[in-house]
Amino acid sequence: QVQLVESGGGLVQAGGSLKLSCAASGGTFSSYAMGWFRQAPGKDREFVGTISRSGGTTYYADSVKGRFTISRDNAKNLVSLQMNSLKPDDTAVYYCAASTYRAYSSRGSEYDYWGQGTQVTVSS
């Protein structure tokens, strides 16, 4: 069983930056593709980005491309989401997720494990 715990959320002004982290335990972290998703109030969950098992491949939603960067440290069982140039539209609960059977994926249905989420609020 894999446990994922996000941290690093908070309140930031538009144009600012935040770095989210997701700590994994209970499994072989380097064998999982990792993803970040977000859900704003009243909206469906939205794909943010994904990173392959080795970290060699990343893929982002168009809405965050060029502003957000995903990285991972397999030695520390950590995946991070660096968010720059934040906008009010980025306000959401951010979730990390692990996929045990996909190399990387933008589909939430292809992730087996999810964290509880961390709130990010961007003020205008």
Image (tube, helix red, strand yellow):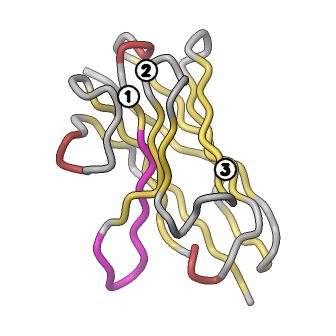
Residue type indicated by callout 3: Gly
**Rendered view: 114 above or below 48:** above
67 magenta-colored: no
Residue marked by disc 2: 53
2 and 1 marks in contact (CB < 8 Å): yes
**Rendered view: 40 above or below 42:** above
Segment tinted magenta in the rendering:
35-44
Residue type indicated by callout 1: Ala
Coordinates of residue 71 in the picture (x, y in percent): 62, 33
Residue marked by disc 3: 8
Q: CA distance from mark 2 to mark 1?
A: 5 Å
Q: Secondary structure at mark 2?
A: loop
2 and 3 marks in contact (CB < 8 Å): no
Query: Quick one: quadrant of the C terminus?
Result: bottom right
Q: CA distance from mark 2 to mark 3?
A: 22 Å
Q: Quadrant of residue 85?
A: bottom right
Q: Which mark is residue 33?
A: 1
Give 79 or 68, whichever is nearer the viewer.
Answer: 68
Of the two numbered discs 2 and 3 in the rendering, the one whose residue sits closer to the viewer: 2
